[in-house]
Amino acid sequence: METIDRYMHAVAQALPECRRDEITRELRANILDSLESIREQQEREPTEGEVVAVLVTLGHPQQVAASFLPPQQLVTADLFPLYRQSLHYGAILVFILGLIQFAISFLNSGNMDFIDLFHGLVMKGLITFAVITGLFYVFSNPPGGKPLFNPYQCWSPEKLPPVSRPWQRISSAEQGVDFASDLFFLLLLNYSFWMPSEQVSRLAVIFADPVREWIPLLSGVMIVSLLFGLWNMVYQYWTIPKLVIEALINLGVAVILLKVSRLEQILVHTHNPLVEPVEMLELANHIFGVGVFWVGMWLMFIAGWNLYRIWQLSRT
């Protein structure tokens, strides 16, 4: 009986306290029934080896305890779509924070530390993944077994989007790239509004005066694009009015960027005696100019593509 008591104690340790007595009583009764069957067949008391064989047949104490409890999953099948979407939005947030940190570092030193950017993105991504997964584990295995919330209780067939073409659905990746890039450039262009004045005074490089003339207009377009991105997060499909707005935003940003790319200087030294001058600023200006030009050309292409999609939807 000592072996049975040790086995029952091991099973009890793997059970919730509220069900421990109930399950151990039932399990002990099953074990004693098996030993009683051996006693009747052999017409003698079961040996220690036979007792051990019965317990081995039942399985490891943790396996036995789990068989009496509801199955647990890291994330249930019902919540997995919402879990995947939360990971997408978490990745967007991590990317935005990483770009902001990278921009601050660049403005302070004039150096582009891509290794530090990559390291920061990986570490923040792992923490975000752990936090989101932990929350959904609790949602999937709520204390007491009662669901904490039902994310699908308010849906109705009438609210399903009027989608007739596969490309009309806006993917989370598309939303994330657009929203993160808009927010990053808006913060970068208007660093003087949110950075402490002491930190601004220590900057190694700033935007040239001709570039600053375009910042208010470009910032206005970025704000409109951000609000439009929030609209797309709620209604994740393309319609003709939304494509028109998207085309106008892309066209407006493209025109401004093409104008800026023709400037001789985009970044200039602050000539701050407390800050070391940035090396190869002329090369950096050339790289920025070429990059801004091709981004503008790409946005022109996207605006044309939006017009083509408008034509496609107008024929349905």
Image (cartoon, rainbow, N blue to C red):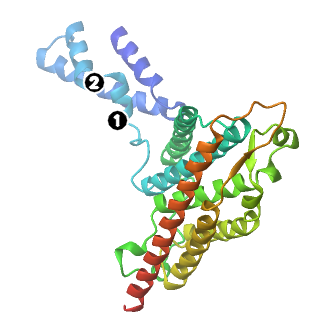
Under mark 2, the amino acid is: Gly
Q: Position of residue 213 (x, y in %)?
A: 76, 64
Instruction: Give the SS element for disc 2.
Output: loop
Q: Measure how far apart labels 1 and 2 are at the Cα level.
A: 10 Å
Q: Which of 308 and 167 is in front in this view?
A: 308
Mark closest to the chain's N terminus, 1 or 2 = 2
Horizontal side, residue 203 vs residue 130: left or right: right
Q: Position of residue 218 (x, y in %)?
A: 69, 66
Q: Nearer the viewer, residue 120 or 199?
A: 199
Under mark 1, the amino acid is: Ser
Horizontal side, residue 39 vs residue 155: left or right: left
In terms of image quadrants, where is residue 48? Answer: top left
Instruction: Give the SS element for disc 1.
Output: helix
Q: Where is residue 66 in the image (x, y as percent from the top left)?
A: 38, 33
Please state the total of marks drawn on the protein image.
2
Residue 59's tag is 2
Quadrant the C terminus occupies: bottom left
Q: Is residue 308 visible?
A: yes
Q: Which of 134 and 21 is in front in this view?
A: 134
How many neighbours does mark 2 have within 10 angstroms: few (below 14), some (14-19), or many (20 or more)? Answer: few
Q: Which residue does the image show at 27% across and 24% down from the upper left?
A: 59
Q: Which residue does the image show at 19% across and 23% down from the upper left?
A: 37
Q: Position of residue 1 (x, y in %)?
A: 34, 11
Horizontal side, residue 251 vs residue 108: left or right: left
Q: Mark 1 points at which residue?
A: 67
How many neighbours does mark 1 have within 10 angstroms: few (below 14), some (14-19), or many (20 or more)? Answer: few
Q: Is residue 47 visible?
A: no
Position of residue 173 relative to residue 216, above or below, is above
Q: Are marks 1 and 2 in contact (CB under 8 Å)?
A: yes
